[in-house]
Image (cartoon, rainbow, N blue to C red):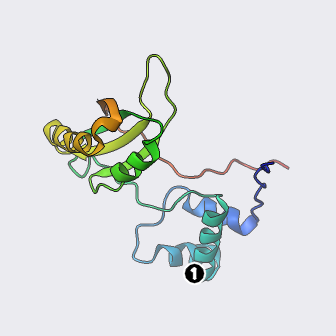
Amino acid sequence: MEQAPQAVIIDDIDRQIIAATQDGLPLVPRPYEEIANSLGLPAGAVKDRLNSMLDQGVIRRIGAIPNHYRLGYTANGMSVWDVDDRLVDEIGEMVGALDYVSHCYKRPRAMPRWPYNLFAMVHGKTTEIVENKVAAIRELVGEASRSDDILYSTRILKKTGLRLSERTT
């Protein structure tokens, strides 16, 4: 019998670290030291606690979130694929490993209107570049995909990290 996931308890120091990083890491050469100094902690403690929260699943990842538009990548296409369910994990690993795919994930289909179960984000400075990259994915995927499409972004959405709600007592 499968057990339910255990609730993770975070303490006040973890909450302070989350609050200090929820708008992103400071853009300085040593961001963990800056956070640690602002909280009166050693930098190693901040790193250790963040790693522990990653290991426990409290936070999923620590990474850069680039603004592709500011970098000149104005053609941002989410390629969507109708991949054989038996192969979607394997194909997703291959597609996600491509250096021009920023993220790739599996999602449930919404039949009959939405047959796609694999999503791969591709950025380019022109739609032609994006379409060429998607054509290369199509060649890689081959007959494992029955159909595909590209959905282009029309605006950038604000991306945020973990947010803590105000605690009530």
Who's the residue at 34% across and 34% down the image? 145
Q: Nearer the viewer, residue 161 or 112?
A: 112
Say left or right for 17 vs 126.
right
Disc 1 residue crowd, few under 14, some 14–19, many 20+, Cα 10 Å = some
Who's the residue at 36% across and 39% down the image? 156
Who's the residue at 78% across and 60% down the image? 9
In the rendered image, the residue lying farthest to the top is 112
Q: Where residue 127 sits in the image (x, y, percent)?
A: 17, 36
Residue identified by numbered label 1: 43
Say left or right for 15 vs 50.
right
Q: Is residue 39 above or below residue 2?
A: below
Q: Where residue 78 sits in the image (x, y, percent)?
A: 33, 37
Element assignment for label 1 = helix
Residue 56 appears in the rendering:
yes
Q: Nearer the viewer, residue 168 or 131?
A: 131
Q: Is residue 83 above or below residue 23?
A: above
Type of amino acid at the residue the image marks with label 1: Ala
